[in-house]
Amino acid sequence: MSQLLEKLTMPAPAKLRDLIRQIRSVRTQAEERAVIEKECASIRGMFRDEDNTYRCRNVAKLLYIHMLGYPAHFGQLECLKLIASPRFTDKRIGYLGAALLLDERQDVHLLVTNSLKNDLNHNTQFVVGLALGTLGNICSVEMSRDLAGEVEKLLKSSNAYIKKKAALCAVRIIRKVPELMEMFLPATKNLLNEKNHGVLLTAVCLITEMCDKSPDALAHFRKMVPQLVRILKNLIMAGYSPEHDVSGVSDPFLQVRILRLLRLLGKNDSDASEAMNDILAQVATNTETTKNVGNSILYETVLTIMDIKSESGLRVLAVNILGRFLLNNDKNIRYVALNSLLKTVQTDLNAVQRHRSTIVDCLKDPDISIRKRAMELSFALVNSNNVRGMMKELIFFLEKADPIFKVDCTSNICIAADKYAPNKRWHIDTMLKVLSTAGSYVRDDVIAHMISLVSEASSLQAYTVQHLFRAIQEDITQQPLVQVASWCVGEYGDLLMSGQVEEEEPLQVTEDEVLDTLEKIMNSSGSSAVTKSFTLTAVMKLSTRFTQTIPRIQALMDQFGSSVDMELQQRSVEFAKLFKSYDHMRSGLLERMPPLDAKVGSKGDGEANTNGETTAVSPPASPAVKQEEGNALLDLLGGGPSPAPVIPQVEKPAAPPAASNDLLGDLLGLDLSSPAAGPAPMVPGMSAPQPQVDMLGGLMDGVTPQPAVQMSANNLGIPSLTAYEKNGLKIEFSFQKDNSNANVVIITLTATNSTDAPMDEFVFQAAVPKTFQLQLQSPSGSVVPASNMGVVTQVIKILNPQKAPIRMRIKLTYNYKGNNVNDMGEVNSFPAALWQ
């Protein structure tokens, strides 16, 4: 009795409006949290006391707290109690709470299934509407199966209010359980006969969902195209209706939905497309365009025309609509137009070309996203007829473009110029403008392509080198331009001095002026290591083009022999040795490169590498083996391996180990003659076949190499060997003997990958005992393709003068699905025929 009296005398909890007013009056977030915590504590207390009087009010306040982002899960069961209440006001708050606080990931939501089933059969339409709305928000697979029958019955109801909510609920059920779609087909078909726009709108949404999910449903509803066309025509021709009018357009929401459905039904179907051609033309010509509502309908019409098999005249009309969009002041409409034209340009290029001037004007738009789309569309419009004008506009855009655009813009200009250039002179002039305009925002593939272009145009080499040299005399800050210019000056320095340039006044320079400019680049703090490598190689090449400055070039090589940059130091030491010990071979090693053949963006033959070298015909280089990894193999077989000079191609005594003049070895205090270090690099700018310079300055035998493998009868009958097989990677050795040297064994390594992902950055290393000498040639690639779809091969040569049994330690490194894998192994089961 006392507890009852206490409850009766307790003050009623604050109303929702009072809580909102209290929260809005706080000044800090801490004060807001304090108010929320106090109110939640009060609500919890009332829930524990099973106080039914104010449960509806408390749940309403809890939903507001939930909307503010605070936890309110403790009110879930109270929502279920309100749903079970016979009062409509309680049900309304209960279903709202269930829709906000429950979802299919929580088992609690299954407890509401029985209440939903009862309310779906309620006599009051508003209670049925509450149940349908909540079911459409939270239903799971289990609830869909349990309640699909009730929803299907409600689709046949005579009440338009219930039918439109049942249609939306059916959309959710079909998304959860597509196999229940067949249940709703008959009722859905009848919905299109309704006059109520709300029912029509939800029916079109339901049909669209069915057609998306099932090809059978798509074929079924294609028969309804004439009916949909009739509904759309009535909307267009209907007079003013206050109930459905939006800015002078009759029910734009229903029009947009019907257009989307027609796009789906007409795709890849000639009959359906023909049935809707006339109505699409009427919509495109009769829709009001002064308001955004009309523009949205026109946009959907354009998308529908482009997706179905429409007539050519209709497609031109659609492109013209997009062209008008480009003149709109609304940035969103211009962006949508550019984006749509970009998708259309592949199929209707000529129609889009009519709006080329408007598209080019969009390159000057202050909005960055519009400029980006305009740039992409402009490149798509370039062809052989307009290439001169479009390149002029795009280079002007490149001058003013944001840094984020410059890289893509330069590469695309390079591709377009290569594809549509009217002549070589124009092509080279365009690339020179790009290099001088883009600054350092130029990819390596553009540099390589420019070098290849100049090497192929023999009649324009003097013209090009003169322009490039004049450019670097004025500005050496643009690294890509300096790299191309250095390469060309090194290759064609004699043409620069001769002044053999037609149609233009020759540039009068001396040898010292050329070297002054190159030396300025090499001494500049703004020059990158790659640029200095290009320039150093160019200076060395000029030693065979110039006659009066040889001592100065030698002095420059000696000067950079002590550079802190290892690459420059190595190059300088190697080049200096050419002057001293191998001067008779210098002219042959540094002769002019033959024409290169490189495609834009490729990484294949003829591309200038990052060290400033250019090889005429050579496969892509494998990833460089780091020195630390090379030294890791030194102790694999016990004790340091013996020096391993490159195996000569003809039978000659092996080169002795490097002595005290081994500059890099003395500098680092390391034994750099690891057999796993790979083949000696080529002299920069040397055309194959030529003698090679060893890494540490020692020259290989100065003879033209013989064919690497000479097959004979003793190569037959030697079985192959599986050297490694683990984690899907398999490495096999096949064997041959070299006729020119009976002590040389040639092993061909074949790596395959049986996993479902490629193995990137693949590097194979090997070491042999001191009695052997080993050479690893460059592999065919650095990626082992997945699923045995390709192989990586590599040639290994072993010199075995004592004809002892071969032993080998191997090390493998590669990247698999983002993880670096390192493994070692030993191969001891080589066939005895290799040394007998």
Image (cartoon, helix red, strand yellow):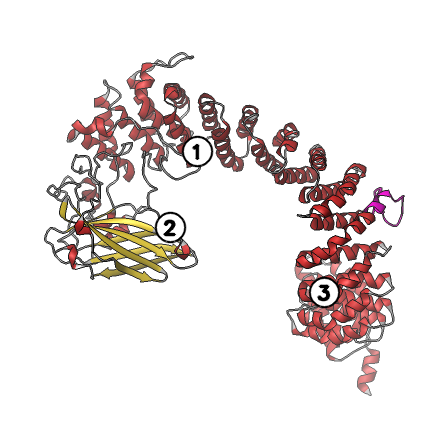
Residue under pointer 1 = 446
Residue 321: name its quadrant.
top right
Sooner in the amino-acid sequence: mark 3 or mark 2: 3
Q: Which residues are magenta?
A: 232-251
Sooner in the amino-acid sequence: mark 1 or mark 2: 1
Sooner in the amino-acid sequence: mark 3 or mark 1: 3
Residue under pointer 2 = 783
| Depicted 51 relative to depicted 810: above or below | below
Q: Is residue 341 left or right of residue 534?
A: right
Camera-side residue of 27 and 118: 118
Residue 602 position in % (x across, y down):
42, 38
Camera-side residue of 325 and 222: 222
Cα separation, mark 1 vs mark 2, equals 24 Å
Residue 79 position in % (x across, y down):
75, 72
Residue at the (77%, 75%) spot, across then down: 115
Dot 3: element: helix
